[in-house]
Image: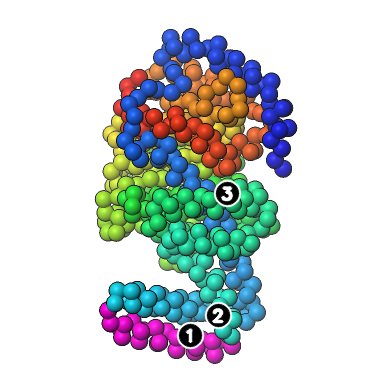
Amino acid sequence: MLIPEPVEAALNFSWHVTKGIAHVSLWPVRAIMGTPDMPTTHKPKEGESVYDIADPMLDIASIIYYYTELRSETKVLLVKYAEKFNLTTKEIDIIRNAIMKTVTTLEAVKEVEQADVSTSNVLADYQVSLKQLEDIKSRFNLTGGDVDVFTTYFNILKEPKSAESIKSDLLLYNDFISPLFRKSFGGSEWNVSNIISMVDRDPTMYIKEIDDDFSKKSFAKFINGFESELVYAIFVSPANKRVTVAFRGSVNANDWKTNMYGFGVMTDFELPGYTSDESAARDARQSYGRVHQGFYEYLFGKTKKGANESYKSKSEEIMGILCDLFENECKGFSLFVTGHSLGGSLSTLFAARAATFGQFGKVTNVSFASPYCGGQEFRDHFYELEKKNLIRHIRISNEEDVVPLIPFFAPNGIAPPEMFKHVGMNIRMYDGDHLLMPKCRLFYPKEGSLPNEIRNAVLNNVPMGLSVGVISKHLCPEYCSRLESSSEELKKISVEVLYEDAEI
């Protein structure tokens, strides 16, 4: 249960004042060490500021929670409705194909009519689809009302899916989502406002692929969630010439199990990920440092057998889809990767995977509230990718969100523990009500810089991240609020200028 804001503010007041006074008093030290809160740069071009890049990424990283929950609840309703007719999974697919054939042929008829050309062929296809649907209704003893119910469910689950259609689904079927989930993930109004922002930026935006086939319902079916796999979606924005891979954060039991795996024990970051037993035995894979084993296995390990009979890892599945996209309908586009919390860590690992072999040019990773995901050798590999202009990473975190501060070390048996290290440009955002504190600050683990290392160690640790009401500071609505509060500062800097600045 979240603490009421006035109570939380009162309880944190003395702690915030103490930190504010310390911040002001250390200004001379920061000046001598050359570590200002934010760098001074020339104004970026329209659409190239850190804010311009982070804002749409946060909308995507947030909406994937809510939209996949709508899909999850819809699947439950679909199965329950199918049980009335004792339908098997195969029979549900037969009904789905017949209904969606009717839907698509009707859409084709409307498109042809608007183009003012002959409709004879597409109209004939539509009439055939109607006849086939009537045969299906007769075969399974379905009424027109039953078909309407199935059509609603199948339309929600349809892929690809335009952002405009997602907005419509959230407005029409919001009640499918449990009140507990709605309240826990920002509420209906806030989530609908996110998808409206996405549509306003690019009315042609769509989800090309969404993989939630092995994701169980949250909350009520939490224990069943131990059988779940990670969830991702691929968004395409033609107006911005951008493909974005988004990873969902923690919702079900297996997500949390992944977070807690071995209390953060590390494993080798071997690439590429699993594709088959034969290739694993035949092909040598190279290690690029050490990373969180739970995150690695979730993204790069063997999966359950999918509809295509494959056990291929999620990472290589996504890589295959992206390669096809960039060779065909998205030629010349840029690749972005994002996610919040667990999704943030997965996004960083996948961005490193996508950048390592250079298939997509420069990869831009914007992560929110990401826990640590790798050690020093992984950071060293990341440095090399940054130097080669193959990756850019903006890691956004909230002050007093403890999640980005853990796990700070990995147990290693009787040997000394392995220390986790963050990568990328860190934008730390502060509550606007904190006295004497800036709106945001920039941190970067500059290679070979002792002053930077000391500053980051002093200001980025669990004790400094503790406060009353830590949960609310980790959630997407608070990240959205602080991003807006910091917008004036973040519109003054660009990602590329930050990476070109040798002083940072």
Which residue corresponds to mark 2? 147
Q: Of marks 1 and 3, which one's residue comes earlier in the chain? A: 1
Closest to the observer: 146 or 464? Answer: 146
Main SS, magenta region, reads helix
Amino acid carrying label 2: it is: Val
User: Where's residue 251, x and y in %?
Assistant: 60, 50
Residue interval drawn in magenta: 117-141
Which residue corresponds to mark 1? 133
The mark lying in front, picked from 1 and 3, is 3
The structure residue drawn at horizontal position 62% and vertical position 82%, both measured from the top left corner, is 85
Q: Does the magenta stretch include residue 128?
A: yes
Which residue corresponds to mark 3? 190
Q: Of marks 2 and 1, which one's residue comes earlier in the chain? A: 1
User: Where's residue 296, x and y in %?
Assistant: 48, 44
Q: Can you tell which quarter of the image residue 75 is in?
A: bottom right
Q: Distance between the residues labelled 2 and 3?
A: 32 Å
Closest to the observer: 188 or 218? Answer: 188
Q: Do the residues labelled 1 and 3 touch (CB within 8 Å)?
A: no
Q: How far apart are marks 1 and 3 (CA)?
A: 39 Å
